[in-house]
Image (cartoon, rainbow, N blue to C red):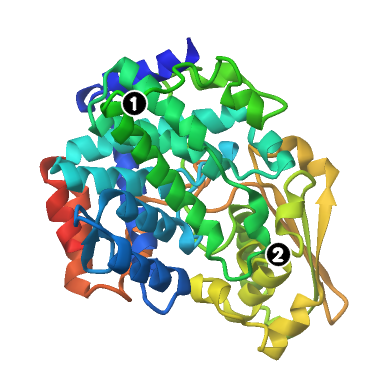
Amino acid sequence: MYTKKLAEFVTQTNFNSLPVNALKEAKKVLLDTLGAMLKASSPKYSASKILKNYCEKHGGKPEATVIGMKFKTDLLNASLVNGTLAYYCDIESIHPSTITHTAAVVVPTSLSVCEHMELDGKELLTSIIVGYEVETRVSAAFDPNALYKRGFHPSAVAGVFGAAASAGKLFKLDIEGEQRALGLAGLQAAGLLAWVSDETENSRPFQMGFASRNGILSCVLASQRFGAPKQIFEGKSNVLEAFSDNPKREKLVEELGERFLITETAYKRYSCCAFLQPAADALSSLIAEHALKSEQIEQITLRFPAQGAPVIDNNELKSHNAQYILPVLAVKGDVQIDDILFERRENEEIKRLYYNTKVIHDEELSPLFPRSYASIVELKLKDGRTLSKRVDYARGTPQNPMSFDEVVQKFRKLASEVLTEIQVDQIVRFVDQIEKRSVKELVELL
């Protein structure tokens, strides 16, 4: 029942049936994700360089472009690399309540398949929206808190289903074929949180890459009538019961086709875990409001909902480490990809604050999570004053939104290292009119 209803949604949704607000948000998500991918494609970053070398040696037939790298590889490897690039900077958008980096999976999937099949912008936007709906609903059905408790990353485990939906739409699978694709995706669902101990930050984004690749592979095989379980969400040994102690199947189809979850996208301003975005806003506000220098701060305390706090409390990954991110922000005024991929603690001031920052696992904030990543930042100053700021919704969330123009400015900042100003302007204009253009033209600009 549930699997079939999702397959019906994927196969029967078309561009003309989609609401205007969902289409506008899809353009915003597309541009934002392209900025993250372009920024991450720089050869100075290890994962990008290693995967490029891999594809040049083992890439096979040139079917789809590796974004920002000026070469093509086979469809599966292109999606693997592009998905990795999309999450590498940790600056791409998220869906907060399902704790998924949805765009980092469905945008690379849709781009790679659309280019390979020579499809147009309408099909691109439709596939992004369809994949977004499926991935977020699957994460909600798992219950992302239950996944975290078991040591799984919701974005990766649910991501393969989003990719199977995006690609399935573009492959024009029928209902039964999409059911098989979702079944094959379930067989490949994976994503351990073990990457939290990988200080290189290579394996973290790699999970979005293999979710994209595996979802496309599922559709390639399903299109050739490869056998698969057709009730992956409710049948024998189904995926929901395998990964979760608290599955909520009704979330798969709740308001399906009526409420589009892509309109709940949250956009990041800083290169770090989404859980840290409200704290970064709070700290930035305190510094601006009181004209503070980092040297005036004796101690930084972050109060965060108890369920999510372990992810950001002294995490070995700099991108997920509150004790690292907040001092970098206090000293530099910003946190971007170079700050999470390259060590900044050689700076004595950052190092001092690193050892004077703590996270409190706050039970009083817990009832709000994951609907809100409510954060309270407290600063103890050297002159004896204590300052405090609470932010429930970071700038960029639906409750505190960024405009399209703000996302454009973010894109310009991210893409400027890889592309010329003229190219950046062309892409911005192209995405704004993507429904009238071909995806091949867009990829050539990238």
Other residues around mark 1 within 10 Å, as few (<14) / some (14–19) / many (≥20): some
Query: Looking at the picture, does residue 170 appear above or below residue 284?
Result: above
Relative to 132, does residue 64 appear above or below in the rendering?
below
Q: Please state which of residues 110 and 224 is positioned toward the viewer in this rendering.
A: 224
Left or right? Give the position of 78 relative to 311: left
Residue 22 appears anywhere in the view: no
- In the displayed structure, does residue 399 sit left or right of residue 438? right
Q: Residue at x 57, y 62 (%)?
A: 272
Q: Three-letter amino acid code at disc 1? A: Phe
The answer to which quarter of the image holds residue 226 is top left
Query: Where residue 100 sits in the image (x, y, percent)?
Result: 53, 43
Kind of residue at badge 2 = Ala
Element on which disc 1 rests: loop
Q: Which residue is drawn at 65% across and 32% down?
A: 243
Tell me, yes or no, if residue 235 can be seen here: yes
Camera-side mark, 1 or 2: 1
Asked which secondary structure carries label 2, the reply is helix
Query: On the image, numbered disc 1 is attached to which residue?
Result: 226
Q: Nearer the viewer, residue 99 or 291?
A: 99
Q: Relative to 402, is 318 on the left or the right? A: right
Kindly indicate the quadrant of the structure image that contains residue 421.
bottom left
The span from disc 1 to disc 2 (Cα, nearest Å) is 46 Å
Q: Mark 2 points at which residue?
A: 322
- In primary-sequence order, the first of circles 1 and 2 is 1
In the displayed structure, would residue 182 be above or below residue 398?
Answer: above
- List x then y, in percent, for residue 191: 58, 46
